[in-house]
Amino acid sequence: MESSKLFFSFFYCCFLLSSGYICIQASPLNHHHRRQKHEISDGSLRPKKLFVFGDSYADTGNIRKSLGNSWNEPYGSTFPGKPAGRFSDGRILTDYIAKFLEVKSPLAYEWMEMGGKKLRNGLNFAYGGSGVFNTIGDLLPNMSTQIGFYDKLVHDSVYTKSDLKSSLVLVCLSGNDYGAFLAEGGTMQGLQTFIPRVVNQLGVNLKRLQQLGATKVAVTLLQPLGCLPRSTVDTTFRRCNTTQNLAVSYHNLLLQQIVAKLNNQSKSSTFFIIDLYSSFTTVLNEKRDYLGNLRFDTPLKPCCVGTDGYVCGSVDEKGAKMYTVCSDPKSAFFWDLAHPTEAGWHAIYTTFKSTLEQAFKFY
C-alpha cells in the first residue's frame, strides 16, 4: 500500500517556503496550399490566440520566483538560456502548441502588466502544482480560479468574448489533485471514488469555458504516471509501474466520456482530446522522435537528478548545488522526476501534431 501511495507522490514540483522545501511535485506547420496565413480548409480563420489553463506541464512562468524551483538553475538552460519559470530545460507543451498555431507562446498571467502587444497572443493562466481543487490550501489558484482570472479580464475589457471564440484554449491537468488527496491521508480505495470527482469538476470547468465563448478547447489526457522517474527509480529507471498506469487509464476513460458528452450536448466539436498517455508511451517505446533523429537510450532516466535527498535545482545552506545534470539534455526524455526535457516535449508534440491538424482541418 505504501508503494501505491508513491503512485501520486511525483505530482508536485518543489516549492521553497519559509519552513524549507515542500515537495509538491506535481517546426512550424508546413503549408503548401495557397491560403492566407490564418486561413483553414473551410475558409474560416485559424486561432490567432492561445489561452492556457492547468499546471506545470503548461506553466511558462506563473509560479513566483520565491516558490518554484523552475526559477532555479539549471531549469531553462536550453531555452531561453536561464531559468524562466518553465518546468524543464527548455520549451514545454504550451510552446509547441503555440508553434503549431504560428503564434508566439502566450505571456504568463503573472507578468501581464509587462505584456503590452504581447497580450494579443493570448495568455497563460497555468500554475505548476495546481489542480481542479486546491492542492496546498490557497497558495496556488485552482483551475476554477484560473478561469475566473480570465473572466475578470473580460469584465475589465482587456479581452472580449469574441477573443476566446477565435482562440484555441489548452486545458492541461497532470494529476496534482491526486497527490494532494493522498498526502492528506486519502487511501487508494478512496481514490477510486475521488477520481470521478476530479474528472467531473474538470467537466464543469470545460463547460464554463464554452459558456465564456470558447469554440476550440484542447484537453489533455493524463500521462502514464507509472512511467515517470519518480515511479521508476526503484527499478533503476528501467520499468514502468503497470498498476499505477491502470489507475491513470480509469481517469482517462472518464475524461473521454465527459468530453464526448459535452460535445453531444452542444452538438459541436468544441472539445478535442490530446492523448498524452499514448504520446508518452509511443516515444518511450520507440526511444526516438518521428524522424529518427533523437535517440533516448535510457528514456526513463531523468537528466537532472538531486543528490542526498534533494531535487533538481536545489542548493544547500552554503549555496552548493545538490544535483547533477546529464551532459546532453537532448539525449534525455525526462528532465527531472516528473517533467520531460525540451527534446522530450518535441518528440511528444510530433506524435499528437496530427490531432491538431485534424481538429483544425489544415491541409
Image (tube, rainbow, N blue to C red):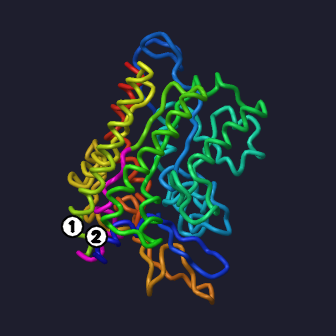
Residue 116, horizontal then vertical, whole percent: 77, 38
Q: Quadrant of residue 2?
A: bottom left
Quadrant placement of the N terminus = bottom left
- Left or right side of 296 for 302: right
- The residue that mark 2 highlights is 232
Residue at image point 55% right, 76% down: 22
| Crowd rating for badge 2 (residues with CA inside 10 Å; few <14, some 14–19, many 20+) | some
Farthest residue, direction bottom: 318
**Mark number, residue 86:** none
One can see residue 181 in this view: yes
Q: Nearer the viewer, residue 280 or 208?
A: 208
- Left or right side of 232 for 87: right
SS at badge 1: loop
| Crowd rating for badge 1 (residues with CA inside 10 Å; few <14, some 14–19, many 20+) | some
Label 1, label 2: how far apart the Cα atoms are: 6 Å
SS at badge 2: helix
**Mark number, residue 239:** 1
Q: Are marks 1 and 2 in contact (CB under 8 Å)?
A: yes
Residue at image point 63% right, 68% down: 67
Q: Which residues are magenta?
A: 221-235
Q: Amino acid at mark 2?
A: Thr
Q: Is residue 77 magenta?
A: no
Pick whichever of labels 1 and 2 is earlier in the sequence: 2
Residue at image point 40% right, 58% down: 340
Q: Judge whether 259 appears above or below 250 on screen.
A: above
